[in-house]
Amino acid sequence: LIGAWSREAVRPYLSAALAAFGPDRMIFGSNYPVDRPLVPYARMVDDLEALLDEQGPGIAEAVMGDNAMRWYRLDQEEGR
C-alpha cells in the first residue's frame, strides 16, 4: 500500500479483517493526517464505505459508526 491508494489495493486487507473479526468487532479508524500524501480523507472514507457496502447490508454502517456507538456506549443517556 505504500505510495498508492486504491480500492483494489485495500480490498484484500479489509476482506481478511472481516473474515478474522467479523463486522460486529470492527470500528473505523484512520492514520490521518499521516496518510494525507497518499489519499484525500474523503476519498479514503468513500472507498472504505463502498467496499464495506459490497459485503452486505448494514456492514458499512456497523463498521463506520454503529459499533463505536455500541462499544463506547455513546448511545446511552449520560449518567446511566
Image (cartoon, helix red, strand yellow):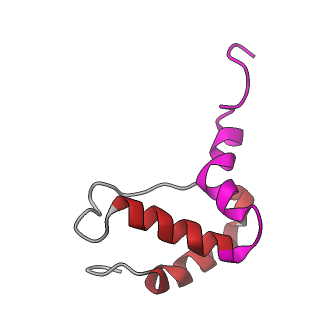
31 sits left or right of 25 in the view: left
71 sits left or right of 43 in the view: right
Q: Quadrant of the N terminus?
A: bottom left
How many numbered discs, if any?
0
Please name the residue shown 47% across and 62% down the image.
Answer: 45
Magenta span of residues:
54-80
12 sits left or right of 40 in the view: right
Observer-nearest of 18 and 51? 51
63 sits left or right of 8 in the view: right
**Quarter residue 41 falls in:** bottom left
**Quarter residue 11 falls in:** bottom right
Q: Is residue 68 above or below residue 4?
A: above
**Where residue 36 appears, x then y in whole percent?**
26, 62
Residue 9 within the magenta-colored segment of the rendering: no
Please name the residue shown 69% across and 55% down the image.
Answer: 62
Please name the residue shown 73% across and 26% down the image.
Answer: 76
Please name the residue shown 25% across and 80% down the image.
Answer: 3
Residue 63 within the magenta-colored segment of the rendering: yes
